Amino acid sequence: FNIIDATNFCYEGKEMKIEIISVGKVREKYIKLGIDEFKKRLKPYCKLVLTEVRDEPAPEHLSEKELQQVKDVEGRRILQKIHPSSYVIALDANGTMWDSEQMAKEMEQLAVKGHHHLTFIIGGSNGLSPEVLTRANFTLSFSKFTFPHQLMKLILLEQLYRAFKIQRKEPY
């Protein structure tokens, strides 16, 4: 019989590790402040690792071939950072949409199934390469809206925090 320890979201003694791999650096101070706040809030719930890979310089008007080359280069950088045993969730406009309760439930089920290392992937402004999407175990869409990839990191952190609060039935 397996028990989840809701006090620090351990399953069979293993702490949940969540990694977010994103393309490009966050430059806006207000987004950095928000990210720092949610990093602090998430400490009791999981081990959080934020990894940034360099974005590929790209002019505004790219041909389809040039766009694919940019995504491929960024994709290789992302793939090099993914731990082989991690369960990978790529954020993609064509992914499945969850509400906050569903995200909490799915994360809990992943832990029950032995997935203690989750990696979320946020692509650059041009999206993710087909190779990254193929490597992903699941693709998740937050909205039909398009968000700046830097802001998406903050939104994802807030939703992870909300998911842990829902799992513990704690007020937000």
Image (tube, rainbow, N blue to C red):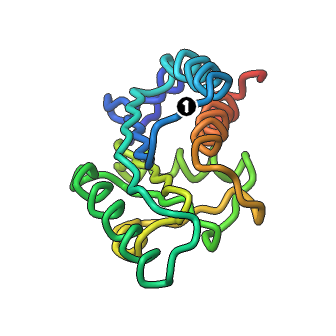
The number of callouts visible is 1
Please state if 161 lies on the left or on the right of 73 as rendered.
right
**Residue shown at 57%/72% (left/top)?**
61
Q: Quadrant of the N terminus?
A: top left
Q: Position of residue 84 (x, y in %)?
A: 21, 55
Front residue of 149 and 17:
149
Q: Position of residue 140 (x, y in %)?
A: 59, 62
**Residue shown at 34%/49% (left/top)?**
114
Q: Position of residue 125 (x, y in %)?
A: 56, 58
Front residue of 12 and 131:
131
Q: What residue type is labelled 1?
A: Arg
**Residue shown at 65%/23% (left/top)?**
34
Please state if 102 lies on the left or on the right of 36 as rendered.
right
Q: Helix, strand or loop at disc 1?
A: loop
Q: Quadrant of the C terminus?
A: top right
Q: Mark 1 points at which residue?
A: 27
Please state if 23 lies on the left or on the right of 98 as rendered.
left
Q: Position of residue 106 (x, y in %)?
A: 57, 53
Front residue of 138 and 94:
94
**On screen, residue 101 above or below 60:** above
Q: Residues within 10 Å of mark 1 (few under 14, many from 20)?
A: few
**Residue shown at 41%/66% (left/top)?**
137
